[in-house]
Image (spheres, rainbow, N blue to C red):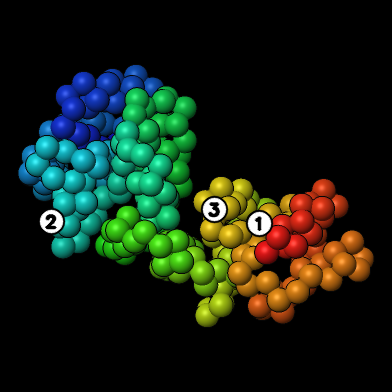
């Protein structure tokens, strides 16, 4: 089986060499075909080497990782960002469905990222849309205008967070219900959406249900408690969450 050709683009030499050493030691299925120190060098080596995977720093001496990506009319490789950036930048990356590693790179997190890469190799991706989402989310200060990239097996969607009504667990997947299109099956567990959306007015009311409280129509206290949202679907409140939900709704 052919090895996966990878390129590391980072203006910190020690960071490049450290990541390359971990990959060589822990992941023989990955061939580090080259290392680049910036945007121009990265563009040249990607063009020459045609890697399948690029580990990409965000801010470099001659520009950003996104400046590099924008040089390509068609992007035929996958990207894993490697960054030491703050929570605000990481939030924009996560909302845009890019994968990332934090510096210094942890061997376990690298293994998990490469596993996600392998699982997604056969799935169509749209880096242009994901870049658009990142730039929009990074530049937009208002939470109400944030957008999230949602990938199904067939398509990729750019959805305003305010349009998401609720998320429902489905094994290790999640159904995402929005106000303007059919439900979407996303290959992420409900915990993924909970951690990403809890600061945006979403609440886990049940083991299987994460809801957007801005879409709340009413709460029925019969039968242990039911929440009814703007899609008119009644959802149960777990016994463990009941008091917390009632208290939060009273505050609202």
Task: Please tell me whether mark 1 or mark 2 is closer to you in this view.
Answer: 1
Q: Disc count in the image?
A: 3
Task: Please tell me whether mark 2 or mark 3 is closer to you in this view.
Answer: 3
Q: Residues within 10 Å of mark 3 (few under 14, many from 20)?
A: few
**Which residue in the structure is indicated by mark 1?**
203
Q: Secondary structure at mark 3?
A: helix
Residue 47 to residue 232: above or below: above
Q: Secondary structure at mark 2?
A: loop
Q: Nearer the viewer, residue 243 or 62?
A: 243
| Sequence-first disc among 2 and 3 | 2
Q: Nearer the viewer, residue 91 or 153?
A: 91
Identify the residue shown where x is 42% and y is 38%: 113
Residue 187: quarter of image: bottom right
* Residue occupying the far front of the picture: 251
Q: Nearer the viewer, residue 227 or 152?
A: 227
Q: Is residue 188 visible?
A: no
**Which residue in the structure is indicated by mark 3?**
199
Q: Determine which of the numbered discs, if any, sits on residue 71 in the image.
A: 2
The percent position of residue 44, horizontal first and vertical second, equals 7, 44
The percent position of residue 121, horizontal first and vertical second, equals 38, 50
Identify the residue shown where x is 41% and y is 67%: 145
């Amino acid at each position: 089986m052919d090895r996966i050709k990878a390129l590391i683009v980072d203006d910190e030499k020690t960071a490049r060499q450290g990541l390359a050493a971990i990959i060589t030691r822990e992941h023989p299925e990955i061939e580090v075909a080259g290392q680049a120190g910036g945007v121009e060098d990265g563009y040249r080596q990607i063009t020459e080497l045609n890697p399948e995977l690029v580990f990409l720093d965000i801010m470099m001496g001659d520009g950003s990782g996104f400046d590099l990506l924008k040089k390509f009319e068609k992007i035929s490789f996958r990207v894993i960002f490697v960054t030491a950036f703050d929570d605000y930048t990481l939030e924009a990356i996560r909302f845009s469905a890019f994968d990332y590693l934090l510096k210094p790179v942890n061997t376990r997190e690298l293994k998990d990222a490469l596993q996600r890469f392998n699982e997604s190799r056969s799935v169509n991706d749209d880096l242009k849309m994901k870049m658009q989402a990142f730039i929009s989310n990074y530049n937009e200060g208002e939470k109400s205008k944030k957008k999230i990239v949602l990938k199904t097996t067939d398509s990729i969607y750019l959805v305003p967070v305010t349009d998401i009504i609720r998320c429902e667990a489905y094994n290790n997947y999640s159904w995402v219900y929005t106000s303007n299109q059919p439900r979407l099956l996303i290959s992420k567990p409900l915990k993924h959406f909970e951690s990403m959306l809890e600061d945006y007015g979403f609440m886990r009311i049940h083991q299987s249900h994460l809801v957007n409280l801005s879409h709340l129509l009413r709460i029925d206290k019969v039968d242990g408690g039911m929440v009814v949202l703007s899609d008119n679907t009644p959802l149960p409140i777990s016994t463990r969450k009941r008091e917390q939900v009632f208290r939060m709704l009273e505050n609202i």
